[in-house]
Image (cartoon, grey):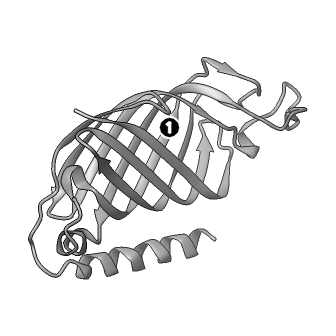
Amino acid sequence: MQKLSILAFLALFTITTYAQEQNTYNTEKVLRINFLNPSAEIEIPTGNYSTFSSGLGIGYGGGYKDLTGNENGAITVIDNGIIYIIAPFLDLQQKWFYNLNKRIGKNKTVQNNSGNFISARFITRGPSIAENVTRTSDFDFAFGPTWGIQRKYGEKFHLLFDIGPQYYFDTEGNGNIFPFMLQLNLGFDL
């Protein structure tokens, strides 16, 4: 599964490298405030069709199967099926946009890096503020390739959605592969 994920990511990267026909657009530096998982984010250009984003905030997330348990090491089962962890996080993402010229050709906005992308994403969470599970470590990490879209609506409104497989682990050596990580951000561009 991990080798397949890496191979798929490399294939998508190769396709997007050659997909941009002409340099009619340069990515922009954008500051954002997100409110679904409250955070501040900065996205800076790393090339004509690529950016690096860094977000810092406090967010809601679920628990990873191999990184949650009770004092005896058994997996915690929640009666209602909802597991939550509210913790500070750092989210780093390198994005490669592949349809900016196509959007320009169709008179669609590319402002504030509105387009489709593939990315390499890394996210880490710190000690919990609130949770209904016991984590094996105060810090956990996840990384993997994603496919996503981000759009600017109106003057300031921002939408980002991405999905992809991930490998997660903690500081105790526990880890595993999860079929997908999902991100949905709504916020405002400053």
Nearest the viewer among 56 and 67 is 56
Q: Is residue 62 left or right of residue 7?
A: right
Nearest the eye: 33 or 128: 33
Count of marks placed on residues: 1
| Place of residue 118 in the rendered image (x, y in percent of width and height, measured from the top left) | 39, 65
Looking at the rendered structure, the secondary structure element under dot 1 is: strand
Left or right placement of residue 153 versus residue 80 in this view: left
Q: Position of residue 110 (x, y in %)?
A: 21, 59
Q: Is residue 55 above or below residue 93?
A: above
Q: Residue at x 27, y 44 (%)?
A: 154
Question: How far from the left and from the top, in percent, is residue 153?
Answer: 31, 47
Q: Is residue 88 above or below residue 153?
A: above
User: What residue is disc 1 on?
Assistant: 124
Going by the image, does 168 lie left or right of 135? left
Q: Nearer the viewer, residue 149 or 9?
A: 149
Residue at the (76%, 26%) spot, across then down: 134
Name which quarter of the figure residue 62 lies in. Answer: top right
Residue at the farthest top position: 129
Q: Position of residue 172 (x, y in %)?
A: 65, 36
